[in-house]
Amino acid sequence: MHSTFEPTLQKYAELIVKIGLNLQTGQRLVIHNSRHNGVSLNAAPLIRKIVASAYQNGARFVDILWSDEQINRLRFESAPADSFEEYPIWQAKAVEEYLRNGDAVLTVLSEDPDLLANLDPEKIAITQKSARKWLKPVNDLISHNATNWVVASAPAPAWANKVFPRLSQENSLEKLWQSIFKTCRLDQEDPIDSWRKHDLDLQTRSSYMTQKAYTALHFTGPGTDLTVGMPDGHIWHGGSAVSENGINFIPNLPTEEIFSMPHKEKVDGVVRASMPLNYAGTLIEDISLTFAGGKVVRLSASKGETLLRRLIETDEGAAHLGEVALVPNSSPIAQSKILTLL
């Protein structure tokens, strides 16, 4: 790694703790990844620096739920066919307890986007349904901002190889780290001050869009001609949020979007994804969705179509849009033009 790597990784950890979480003196912190029942060991270098920064900023206790990706894959290869509804319920209850106590929660994503490639999509769908069931209390508390929480990412070797296939393992990993650092504005002279200004800009843009009160948004592009109707009184959000226990935090690092909730029955047309979707360790590519009356009525994908179909058929709500977001083309994320995990 380049000589600047360690200092920049330290800045990243501090950004997560001070700006993302805005960790308070005396708070506990739990670090996990609900997608795979724990944080991947790939993220260990970053996690260690986050833990050190958390304690230096007054954390009372830091708890980490770990996971090993290859062990997760072994389950799908070798576990009994009738066992995929099993879920480590204690982990979900542990995170729920932290949330109800007003402790900080950090999700770190560091995944192989092809971890479960070529495995039975039926088994994957069953495990995801089971996870949603047991994690519902956690997700409900998160969605209501019961306390301060953040989602961040760290490169995994397989992810780096996927994004930069022509580079060596070491070089691809370094290049992906540098991309994450740049999208998180760590190339700025004062990243924390830069994020405060960026957050203010997102808040300003959100207020502007809320005041405009558009009745619909029209998206066009290659393979896309989609009209998204907006409900009366809709509100746009972006950047920081305030938890129910009064802590200002930024839920996603990086974040460039402002977002709102579309009208359930007024989404019509076709949308095509320009980037793959990493879902449950499987890449779904060349996604095309056709909406009528707010609901997906037709779908296709060149890879992972069966899993996409199962995802859309999960329940009544899964076939509708739950969010619409706007991201400027000039943003670091858009300009990176690479597959991210957030």
Image: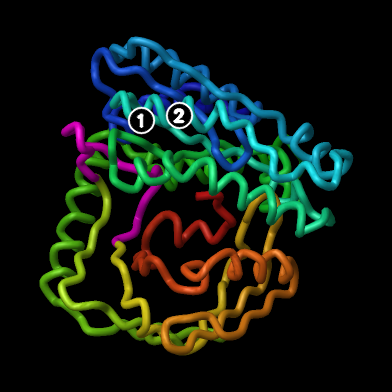
Boundaries of the magenta span: 241-258
Side of 13 relative to 91 (left or right): left
Predominant SS along the magenta part: loop
Of residue 125 and residue 290, the one placed in the foreground of this image is 125
Q: Residue at x 37, y 46 (%)?
A: 140
Q: Give the residue type at disc 1.
A: Leu
Q: Residue at x 72, y 35 (%)?
A: 69
Residue ranking furthest to the front: 82
Q: Are marks 2 and 1 in contact (CB under 8 Å)?
A: yes
Of residue 163 and residue 215, the one placed in the foreground of this image is 215
Side of 191 relative to 273 (left or right): left
Residue that label 1 marks: 99
Side of 181 relative to 313 (left or right): left
Q: Quadrant of residue 106?
A: top left
Residue 57 lies, with reference to residue 269, above or below; the image says: above
Residue that label 2 marks: 95
Quadrant holding the N terminus? top right
Name the mark on residue 79. Answer: none
Counting from the top left corner in percent of width and height, residue 267 is at: 40, 83
Residue 53 lies, with reference to residue 127, above or below; the image says: above
